[in-house]
Amino acid sequence: MSWVAAVARLRARREPGVLVTVATVRGHAPRRAGAKLVVGRTESWGSIGGGNIEAVAIDRARELMGEPDPATEVLDFALNDKVTNRHGVQCCGGTVTVLLEPLPVVPAVAIFGVGHVGYELARILARHNLDLHLIDTRPEQLTEERLAVLADAEAQVHVHRTLLLPEEVLAELPPGAHVLIMTHDHAEDAALCDTALRTLGLGSIGLIGSSAKWARFRKRLSTEGGHDEATIDRIKTPIGLTEITGKEPAVIAISVAADLLLAFQKDLGH
């Protein structure tokens, strides 16, 4: 498997990893500069030459995976019989520098309702390294033509076209996914709020709308849904940063995106 495919596999699994690259070589060494190894929690793909270099790199890569916010590192190896490393002697005669680049699990965001605000928000979030899920019961909101603006996205965009029960998508979302509820239908919003509160493992839950809308929803979630006050308080409304005012879709989208970036930092422990 190529290193590119291995990185893609880890991302699809939402598993952290480390990309290990031979950065520089002087003298004799098992592999040339540019050789790559991808390390996951229990598997690895590719090779940077085997022996002590590779074993130490794998050990350190897995240590990095256990850190909350790992940084890129450089390891230096002298390949001669006078240097005994953690996994023995490697005496090719040269020196090697190895670069370790963490591949963290990226944030996940699900936008339920890709109307005016949802569309603008998708355009902003698509420029970030995350998994972006777009859900709408209206086929015209998720056409290839309308979403063509996301073609060069850095995010991995997952489009969910569902005609009846968008709340079923909640169970398919990755653990920790941040959910934003902003559909065209208040009944749909209410059902999503209720199901989101019953879905284990989600990140933040945000609902767009007025205080009057939320008062109705809150009462319904309590009396009909049977949720207690602490559970209902998991839903944030209004969404976005209160310091940013304005009702234009792009302004609301910027506010919501900024608030999400703060949530991502909180997830990392910053």
Image: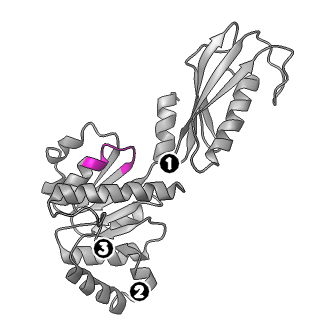
Helix, strand or loop for disc 2: loop
Q: Which residue is mark 1?
A: 105
Q: Which residue is mark 3?
A: 237
Q: From this view, report whether residue 194 is shown above or below residue 201.
A: below
Residue at 50 percent of width and 48 percent of height: 105
Query: Farthest bottom residue?
Result: 223
Q: Nearer the viewer, residue 9 or 238?
A: 238
Task: Tell me whether circle 3 and circle 1 mark residues in contact (CB < 8 Å).
Answer: no
Instruction: Give the residue type at disc 2.
Output: His
Q: For residue 63, which quarter of the picture? A: top right
Query: Farthest front residue?
Result: 243
Residue at 28 percent of width and 72 percent of height: 238
Q: Residues within 10 Å of mark 3 (few under 14, many from 20)?
A: some
Q: Residues within 10 Å of mark 2 (few under 14, many from 20)?
A: some
Q: For residue 84, which quarter of the picture? A: top right
Q: Is residue 115 visible?
A: no
Residue 17 percent coordinates (x, y): 57, 41
Q: Is residue 117 visible?
A: yes
Counting residues from the N terminus, which is met first, the one under dot 2 or under dot 3?
Answer: 2
Instruction: Give the residue type at disc 1.
Output: Val
Counting residues from the N terminus, which is met first, the one under dot 2 or under dot 1?
Answer: 1
Query: Farthest top residue?
Result: 27
Magenta stretch holds residue 51: no
Instruction: Give the residue type at disc 3.
Output: Thr
Give the spatial CA distance, label 3 vs label 1. Answer: 27 Å
Q: What segment carries the magenta color? A: 124-131
Q: Which residue is mark 2?
A: 227
Q: From this view, report whether residue 138 is shown above or below residue 191.
A: above
Residue at 31 percent of width and 55 percent of height: 257
Helix, strand or loop for disc 1: loop
Q: Residues within 10 Å of mark 1 (few under 14, many from 20)?
A: some
Horizontal relation, residue 260 to residue 46: left or right: left
